Structures are given as C-alpha cells and as structure tokens.
Image: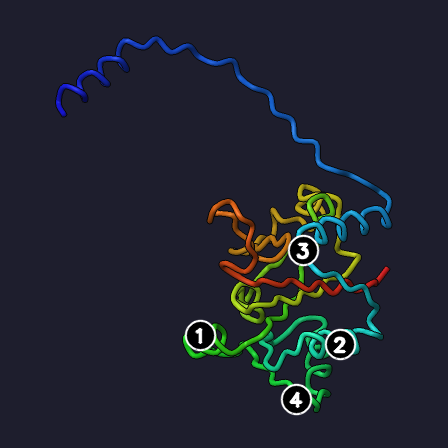
Amino acid sequence: MSTSRNAILSRLRDAKPEAKAMETITYQPWVSNDAQLTRQRFIDGLSASHAEIISTDRDALNNVIKNIVVSKQFSRIALGTAGEFHSDIVKATQSLETPAIETMPFDCDISDLKSALFNDVDAGVTHCRAGIADTGTLVLWPDISEPRTLSLVPPCHIALIKRSTIVSNFAELMVTQAWQNNMPTNIILISGPSKTADIQQTLAYGAHGPSQLVVILIEDM
C-alpha cells in the first residue's frame, strides 16, 4: 500500500502542469420584444418538459379549475392562505358537490400536515411570481402564505401564472423586478414535472416530487 502511494505521489511531483489559457464563455440569452412570440416560447418550453398548459382568462378561471379537478379525479387539494387568485381557487373547489372536494389550507406547522401531504393530498396549488420564456420556467417565491412544500410534495402541482409576468430570460426578470432590492430567502424554478434518469439512464417522472405539472396561464394582456 505504501509503495503504491509513494509511486502516485512521485508521479504527481514529477508532473509539469501547464496553465491553460483562459476560456471566454459568452452566454447569449434568448430575447424578444414580441409578446406573442414570448408567450409561445414559454408554452413550448414547458410542453417539451411534459407540463400541461391551459390558457384562460379571469372570468373562466373558476370553470378551468373545476374541470382540472374533475377530469383528474382529485379528492383532496392543498392550497395556501393568500394570493391574487386564492378566492377563485377556494370558490371553484367548494362549488363541486359531486364529487365533493376537500381543501386543506396550509395554515399550521408542517409537522401537523406532513402525513396528509405525503399520503392523502392529490394536488398542491400555488401562484407564480413570473415565467421565463427562454427556458420554459416557472418562478415561485415561497412564503408563509404559500410554503414551498405545496409545489414539491403532492403528486400534482397546479400553478397559476399571469401572462403579463412572462419575460424573455432570467437576467431580464431580475432587472425588471429589481431583485437586488427585494430577494426572498428561497426561490423555486420549475421547468416541468419532477424527473430523473439515474436508474439505467431511463427517464422517469415523479421520482422525487410531483409527477404532473398543470400550468394555468391567465391571459391578462
């Protein structure tokens, strides 16, 4: 063992490494001033990652939520306690009588909800802070009213995003929303359902998070 170690150390000492020339790597983010093109690139990116995108307006949001819940046969949904469309979510789920839908508000300590979140909840609903067209990505800023667990644990994540918040690229998002002045302690970037290819290089969904991602795109422009 000692002889092998000494041989290895000797080769390392005798080596004459040469400094590599500095590489210049330039990142060229996708940019567009065309709102329709930006919207389509955002949708295409999410669709390519196996997300389901449903476009609607505020007036039809109630029906869209009900249709999702009924078509996917959900019976229990976890949601936050605030947000621009929180009242729409509550109204839509509570108006369903056949089948009846149980909503579980995330209004207490995680330890009190852990068992239900991992075993009984069919979907978690969240709002999105923004969308990135370049990569087809949702941007979430979890807080006490919508903890990050809502988007990470239930088998289906339903995300609501306004079209007006979609930007071309990540750099534009940080500048537009002045992140340097107001950045949360936690940011979640989501570009599709949970997936992994660790086992035999076979792509599988839902290995460590939601196996379904449903994006409700609210057309507000």
The residue lying at 67 percent from left, 41 percent from top is 171
Q: Badge 1, how many Cα within 10 Å: few under 14, some, many 20+?
A: few
As measured in the structure, the alpha-carbon distance from the residue carrying label 4 to the one carrying label 2 is: 13 Å
User: Closer to the N terminus: mark 1 or mark 2?
Assistant: 2
Q: Amino acid at mark 2?
A: Asn
Q: Residue furthest bottom?
A: 97
Q: CA distance from mark 4 to mark 1?
A: 23 Å
Count of numbered marks? 4
Q: Earlier in the sequence, mark 4 or mark 2?
A: 2
* Residue marked by disc 2: 67
As drawn, 53 above or below 97: above
Crowding near pointer 3: few (<14 within 10 Å), some, many (20+)?
Answer: some
Tag 1: amino acid: Lys
Amino acid carrying label 3: it is His
What colour-coding does the image apply?
Answer: rainbow
Q: Is 20 above or below relative to 127? A: above
Q: Position of residue 7 (x, y in %)?
A: 20, 16
The residue at which mark 4 appears reads as 100
Instruction: Tell me if label 4 and label 1 are in contact, CB under 8 Å.
Output: no
Q: Which residue is mark 3?
A: 50
**Marks 2 and 1: in contact by CB < 8 Å?**
no
Disc on the earlier residue, 1 or 3 = 3
Q: Nearer the viewer, mark 1 or mark 2?
A: 2
Q: Nearer the viewer, mark 1 or mark 3?
A: 3
The picture places residue 52, in percent across and down from the top left corner, at 71, 61
Label 2 secondary element: helix
User: Tags 2 and 3 in contact by the CB under 8 Å rule?
Assistant: no
